[in-house]
Every structure is written in structure tokens, then in C-alpha cells.
């Protein structure tokens, strides 16, 4: 026996619940809700303006519809016999970890408590041209379900889910995570961390699983996805929501680990997402980052069909290269990093554009092997963090120059931070690269009263993508003076 650890039951929350213009694509499919899938339709008033949808239909016209790609939704179950899902359902990539069998069918009640997974799956793989519900983003892909969230979960169950059938599954869609309550700070356990790494190294015949995660819905509670360890993993693609108007949404958490955005609901005037629902029904009311992530997973399926040789890092590079700022440009806090990438704490590199991704993938040269350069940094002597004050740590690095771990261009930059402070929610952490790019790693959270500080908490930023690591870095920790709890 090399390692033993008791399993702890933890709560994981599903990230959801929460004027049509003329389209050029209204007659492409005959499904009832197809005209309502505004995020797929090109509804620009002026052709010269930015594309205001996810630019998916041009992929269909090129024969890219998800064929040969296998996607699994990890959630509260999947109604596999739903008339708009069953033709694309794949039992070989499905299982039930709540009851310990191979059938992901959800537990039914009078309240539709376990409809979340079926809604997410429909967005990805609803069958086209059957006059039922809508059309999935990857409507010819194979879809499976892993029933995990009908009750509390633990490290062993999560790791089992995220390492299931690595020989067959290409994409895991995850619209869940730790509680978005503004005070929870949890990361994947040891087993789940190893499962994500294994999926990246061994899945898809060594090219790596694409793990899509919803960035979180806790903004109203002052939450920030820098406090979510699943979003901070380098092996996950964190997806935020953008509203129908191209705005940051009222519920959407922000952080430096978000890769990109997909559309979802915004304010009360905005439309929501069309998809399947329990008992062979349909809905126009799926919402939250829970609805954005499956749209992204469907787009990843189109990308993988277009170029099956892409590695998980290739996929992230293509997202950085092709995501669009223009449809979201009205939002503040866009900035350009030292390598020329536009980045936002709300939207990452911008709005996903399926056709641009597919086009860019066709002749994409796979990136070199990943290098990891670790730079230990500590403060000499005792430094006290006072209320309303900040403490900065400056350090120089050559990016492990001359070593096997040498880095010339950055992808993910991770900071593992140790801070003692009596109120964790008062702490914010920012960093600045040698190129002058500033990134907010963790924001204050007014509901977080924990007294533990930050005990080796890892935070990830993609805002330095493409920059050189060489030079002077600055990490600043600040403690706010006071908090007024309005909840």
C-alpha cells in the first residue's frame, strides 16, 4: 500500500437554476425550437458588424457536425430515452455512480430536481431534423451521462467520474463545482487531481481529454472563481457566460483562469437556452454558466472532428487565438497583454467562435511538449498584513533558462500562496508580469468569514499567455479594512 486517505463527503452544486430578429438560418432545420436558438443564429442587422452568435452553422455546411466524437455529461443523470437524445446516446460511455450501475437515468420527483444533466446533454447533442425540441451544437456526436450529483460526492467518486472510459471519451462537460456561496474555497482532492492529470496525459490516445467546466454563478454572493480549485486546474477549460446583449451577466463569477465565454441568459429581458427536459419535454429556460459550458463542449466536439490530432493544449491555444472580443467589446476591463492577446477577467480571451476554431485547426502545428518551471519565492523576515494595507513580493526569474524545464512562452501561470490572516474573505491577490500585464488572481469575498487565511492555495492565470517569463514579477496581497454583510 503506497497511500491511504479517508474519503470525505462534500457538497457539489449544479451550476444552473437560476424579440427575435430575422435569421439567415431559420430554415436550416425543422425542429420546433430551432428558431429560438438565438445563440446559433446570425441575427446581425448589418453584415459588416461582428458575428453575434457562436458561428456554428458554417461548420455544418462544411460537414462538421460532431461525427465520431464522444462527449459525456457529468451531472445528476441523463434521460437516455428522451426522443431528442436517444439516437445519439452511447451506453458505453455512461454510468451511475450514485447507485453503482451502468444506467444514468435520473431519479424523478414532482419538482424536476434532477433535470440538470438532461438539459446540459440536449444542448450538446439534440438530434436534428426530427421536429422535436431543438438542435444540439454537435448534433451528430455521441452523448453519454455519468450520474454523480444526486447527493453529496467525494474525492473517490469525482475521480472515478473524470477518469471514466478514457479510451473512448473525448470531452467531459461539467456544469458543477463547489458551492457558489461566496465563502466556500475547495479544490479537487488528491485522487481527482490525479484523474485530471491522467486524462490529459492518457486520454484520446495520449492527446488528452478536453475537460470543460462552468465558471460559476456566485457573483451576487460576492464569489470569485479564483476560489474554485476546479477552475484553477490547468487541465480544465473554464467557460463563462455572456448575455444576449453581449454583456457580463449578473450571476457570473470572474477570475483570471477563465478561458472563454459562450452565450447564456442575462437579465430578465434576455432569452435563455433551448434544450431537452425530463419526461420527453423541451424547455426554453436553461440558464447560468451551466448552460454556457455545454455549448462550449459542443463547439469543442466540432473542433475535435475537424482535427482529431489536436492535443488538449492545442485546443487551449486555438481558443486563445480565435475567440472574439468584438461581440463583447462594450464591457470594461479588457486589456492587451505583452504578447498581443486581449484578455478579460469576465470572458477570458473572448466569445467562442466555432467556425474560426475549425478553420484555424486545419493546419495547426501541435505545440511543443509542456515545460513546468517552478520558482520558489518567500519573504525574508516577518511581514504583517495590516487592514487596508498591501504587501508586495517582487522576484526575478529567467524561466529556468538552460534547464530541461526552460520556458520561452507562457501558457498557464500558477501561484501557490500562503497567507495568514484572521478573515480570509478580506484578502485579494494580484500579480504583474515583466511585460506589465496585471492579473487579479483572487478578489475579496464579503461572505467569507474563514479564519484560515490561504494555506497553499493555488491560483491560475491565463492572462500572460504568450509572454516571456523572464524578468521582474510582482505579487501583491491586500487586506480590506471592513466589510458590510448585506445578506
Image: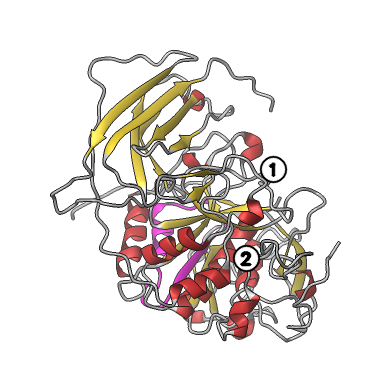
Picture quarter with the N terminus = bottom left
Q: Mark 2: which secondary structure?
A: helix
Residue 156 located within the stretch drawn in magenta: yes
Q: Nearer the viewer, residue 426 or 107?
A: 426
Q: Nearer the viewer, residue 10 or 430?
A: 430
Asked if residue 84 is positioned above or below residue 473 in the image, the reply reads below
Horizontally, residue 168 falls left or right of residue 399, namely right
Q: Look at mark 2 in the image and give the residue it sits on.
A: 120
- First to last magenta residue range: 150-174
**Residue 337 in the image, given as x and y percentages of width and height:** 44, 45
Q: Residue at x 59, y 78 (%)?
A: 59
Asked if residue 135 is positioned above or below residue 245 in the image, the reply reads below
Identify the disc placed on residue 358. Answer: none
Question: Mark 2 vs mark 1: which is more N-terminal?
Answer: 2
Q: Look at mark 1 in the image and give the residue it sits on.
A: 250
**Residue 303 in the image, given as x and y percentages of width and height:** 49, 73
Horizontally, residue 275 falls left or right of residue 406, namely right
Dividing the picture into quadrants, the one containing residue 197 is bottom left
**Residue 243 in the image, given as x and y percentages of width and height:** 70, 53
Residue 379 located within the stretch drawn in magenta: no
Name the outermost residue toward the front.
Answer: 48
Picture quarter with the C terminus = top right
**Residue 364 in the image, given as x and y percentages of width and height:** 39, 72
How many marks the image carries: the answer is: 2
Amino acid at each position: 500500500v503506497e497511500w491511504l486517505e479517508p474519503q470525505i463527503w462534500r457538497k457539489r452544486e449544479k451550476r444552473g437554476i437560476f424579440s427575435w430578429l430575422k435569421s439567415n438560418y431559420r430554415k436550416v432545420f425543422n425542429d420546433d425550437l430551432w428558431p429560438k436558438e438565438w445563440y446559433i443564429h446570425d441575427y446581425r442587422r448589418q453584415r459588416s458588424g461582428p458575428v453575434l452568435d457562436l458561428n456554428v452553422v458554417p461548420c455544418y455546411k462544411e460537414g462538421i457536425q460532431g461525427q465520431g466524437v464522444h462527449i459525456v455529461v457529468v451531472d445528476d443523470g441523463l434521460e437516455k430515452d428522451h426522443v431528442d437524445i436517444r439516437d445519439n446516446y452511447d451506453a458505453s460511455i455512461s454510468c451511475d455512480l450514485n447507485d453503482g450501475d451502468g444506467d444514468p437515468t435520473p431519479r424523478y420527483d414532482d419538482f424536476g430536481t434532477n433535470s440538470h444533466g438532461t438539459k446540459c446533454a440536449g444542448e450538446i447533442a439534440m438530434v436534428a431534423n426530427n421536429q422535436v425540441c431543438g438542435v444540439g451544437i454537435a448534433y451528430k456526436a455521441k452523448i453519454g451521462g455519468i450520474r454523480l450529483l444526486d447527493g453529496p460526492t467525494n474525492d473517490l467518486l469525482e475521480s472515478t467520474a473524470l477518469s471514466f472510459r478514457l479510451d473512448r471519451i473525448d470531452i467531459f462537460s461539467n456544469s458543477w463545482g463547489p458551492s457558489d456561496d461566496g465563502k466556500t474555497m475547495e479544490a479537487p482532492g488528491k485522487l481527482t487531481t490525479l484523474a485530471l492529470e491522467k486524462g490529459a496525459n492518457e486520454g484520446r490516445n495520449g492527446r488528452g481529454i478536453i475537460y470543460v467546466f462552468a465558471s460559476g454563478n456566485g457573483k451576487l454572493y460576492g464569489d470569485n472563481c479564483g476560489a474554485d480549485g476546479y477552475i484553477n486546474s490547468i487541465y480544465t477549460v473554464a467557460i463563462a457566460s455572456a448575455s444576449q446583449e453581449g454583456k457580463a451577466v449578473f450571476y457570473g463569477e470572474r477570475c483570471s483562469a477563465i478561458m472563454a465565454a459562450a452565450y447564456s441568459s442575462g437579465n430578465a429581458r434576455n432569452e435563455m437556452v433551448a434544450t431537452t427536459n425530463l419526461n420527453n419535454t423541451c424547455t426554453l429556460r436553461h440558464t447560468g454558466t451551466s448552460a454556457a459550458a455545454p455549448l462550449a463542449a459542443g463547439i469543442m466536439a466540432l473542433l475535435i472532428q475537424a482535427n482529431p490530432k489536436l492535443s488538449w493544449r492545442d485546443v487551449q491555444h486555438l481558443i486563445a487565438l480565435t475567440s472574439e472580443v468584438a461581440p463583447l467589446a462594450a464591457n470594461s476591463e479588457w486589456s492587451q497583454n505583452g504578447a498581443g492577446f486581449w484578455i478579460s477577467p469576465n470572458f477570458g480571451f473572448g466569445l467562442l467562435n466555432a467556425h474560426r476554431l475549425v478553420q484555424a485547426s486545419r493546419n495547426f502545428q501541435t505545440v511543443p511538449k509542456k515545460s513546468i518551471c517552478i520558482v520558489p519565492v518567500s519573504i525574508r523576515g516577518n511581514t504583517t498584513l495590516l487592514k487596508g494595507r498591501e504587501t508586495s513580493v517582487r522576484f526575478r526569474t529567467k524561466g529556468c533558462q538552460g534547464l530541461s524545464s526552460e520556458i520561452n512562452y507562457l501558457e498557464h501561470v500558477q501561484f501557490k500562496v500562503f497567507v495568514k490572516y484572521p478573515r480570509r474573505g478580506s484578502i485579494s491577490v494580484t500579480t504583474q508580469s515583466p511585460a506589465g500585464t496585471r492579473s487579479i488572481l483572487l478578489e475579496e469575498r464579503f461572505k467569507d468569514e474563514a479564519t484560515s487565511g490561504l494555506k497553499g492555495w493555488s491560483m491560475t492565470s491565463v492572462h500572460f499567455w504568450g509572454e516571456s517569463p523572464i524578468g521582474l514579477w510582482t505579487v501583491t496581497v491586500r487586506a480590506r479594512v471592513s466589510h458590510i454583510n448585506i445578506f
